Image: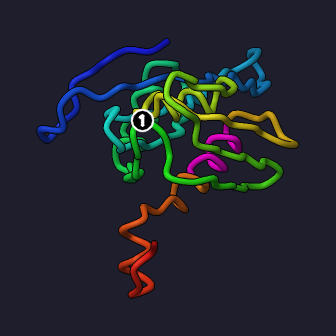
Amino acid sequence: MANNSSGGGGQGDLIDRVLKIKRCAAVVKGGRRFSFAALVVVGDGKGRVGYGYGKANEVPPSVAKAQKGANRAMINVPLLNGTIPHVVSGRYGAAHVLLMPASPGTGIIAGQAVRAVCEAVGIQDILTKSFRSNNPVVLIKATFDALSQLRTREDVERLRGVKLS
């Protein structure tokens, strides 16, 4: 369910991927009333990625809300030769995600939720492992926690005020 759409504000083409559509039923006098929730990941393939969660009474408005939320919540991720600079671990709720850099040609070794984030951010080679929860919503949040902890060598040198050998 991946498609390319033009992002607003001159951001160029964004990769958006609908990961999950949930249906919820409320039993009312006349029968069941359904509502839908969509989980969407949006990225530019060059180090920027965001996720959104939208709820509405129909599927298209819920996806649109999720895309709008994802565009607002984009983060920058440092990349190094198509992979991440170092091993990093992220947690959210019961989910625990481990991201490890991989050599060129490895590809993206990940489950559906983490793979969508890695593809959207532009990572080509990475090894991942998720522990405990397999809920896509919390896996995405744990992955974003891990990606937000990434630092390049230059960032660490600047923050510590030392030169790393």
Residue 33 spot, x, y in % from top left: 68, 21
Q: Residue furthest right?
A: 132
State whether residue 65 appears in this view.
no
Residue 66 painted magenta: no
Query: Compared to 132, does 36 lie above or below?
Result: above
Q: Residue 89 lies in what quarter of the image?
A: bottom right
In the rendered image, the quadrant that contains the C terminus is bottom left
Amino acid carrying label 1: it is Gly
Query: Compared to 81, does 125 lie above or below?
Result: above
Residue at 58 percent across and 25 percent down: it is 108
Q: Which residues are magenta?
A: 137-144
In the rendered image, which residue does mark 1 sit on? 82
Dot 1: what SS?
Answer: loop
Quick one: 4 or 52, which is closer to the camera? 4
Q: Residue furthest front?
A: 165
State whether residue 145 appears in this view.
yes
Q: Residue 109 lies in what quarter of the image?
A: top right
Specify whether 146 is left or right of 48.
Answer: right
Specify whether 46 is left or right of 125.
Answer: left
Quick one: 109 or 143, which is closer to the camera? 109
